[in-house]
Image (cartoon, rainbow, N blue to C red):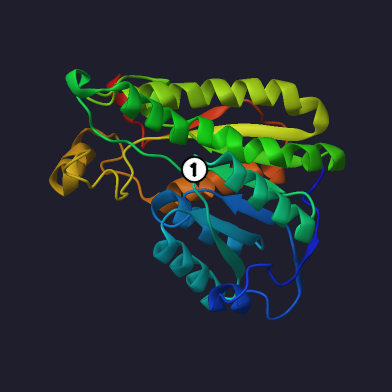
Amino acid sequence: MKKPAVKSVTKPSVKGNPTLARSSEKSVKKPIVLITGGGIGIGRSTGHSFANAGYHVVVTDVLVKEGKAVVSEIIAAGGTAEFHKLNVRSTSEADSLIADIQKRFGAIDCIVANAGIAHKVPLGKLTDEKWDETFDIDLKGMIRVIRPALPAMKKRGAGAIVCISSIMGIAYGWDEHVHYSSAKAGVIGLIRGLAVELAKDGIRVNGIAPGYIRTAQLLSEKHSLGPAGADKAGEFIPMGRIGEPDEIADVVLFLASSAARYMTGQTVVVDGGLLVGRY
């Protein structure tokens, strides 16, 4: 596995955006990471972790305000970053964005496929449309971003891809979230398949299966545990608490680094001991 290439970060092609302009006032040489769903939660923390490690961070999300805020935070801390609105359900948007990044920077060093939804829907109300929406974002949305980046990665002979799954996809189901558990199980299959096919090209593909992490999704009373339920969950986790987004982000950074150079096709469970202690 080759080390990430060092690239000159120049002014993004998007005009009229002061957040983007501030990120490129001076030219710097850095590896490039693209993060989907980078505006909140795990994606936000991952952006900060990579920025602190010296990466130029490309934050993407459908949440424009939140995504731009992450870029501003990274720049204020001395890093470089840019935001692009991206709906991972759109193949054309993904293709165009990857082409633009590669035109300016060359091959992307790391892709963090994090964007996803987890809406609570009981089986009696689980329509084809809702099933397809979840799979289109949580699973197909990953390949849409990964696929156009592969030719340049292959040509360079290096690259790292990290996909975010869930303990709900690797170990047990989640009532009223059949579509979500199924899609996240599919992510694990995606990781394995890509890892085998891309290993000869120097591209590593790994994933993370987070447990209960303090994100907007977990704290939603409509779709998940809610604040009180999240605190209660900590009581049956061996480490005595739920996780924080930065505790996932740091593992993402490890999987992208040379420290994990002989790892591919693996999905790492990060859950405070939940699975081994309870199941």
- What residue do we see at 55% from left, 36% from top? 142
Q: Position of residue 186 (x, y in %)?
A: 48, 22
- What residue do we see at 63% from left, 25% from top? 265
Q: Nearer the viewer, residue 72 or 179?
A: 179
Q: Position of residue 17 (x, y in %)?
A: 56, 75
Q: Nearer the viewer, residue 239 or 195?
A: 195
Place residue 233 in its image quadrant: top left
Quarter occupied by the C terminus: top left
Q: Position of residue 37 (x, y in %)?
A: 47, 49
Residue 1 is at least partly visible in this image: no
Q: Is residue 58 left or right of residue 29?
A: left
- Amino acid on which the number 1 mark rests in the picture: Asn
Q: Which residue is mark 1?
A: 114
Place residue 201 in its image quadrant: top right
Regarding mark 1 in the picture, which secondary structure is present there? Answer: loop
- What residue do we see at 63% from left, 68% from top? 14
Specify the farthest residue to the left.
228
Q: Nearer the viewer, residue 190 or 168?
A: 190
Q: Position of residue 171 (x, y in %)?
A: 38, 20
- What residue do we see at 28% from left, 35% from top? 119
| Mark 1, other Cα within 10 Å: few <14 / some 14–19 / many ≥20 | many
Q: In the picture shown, does residue 191 fall above or below 13?
A: above
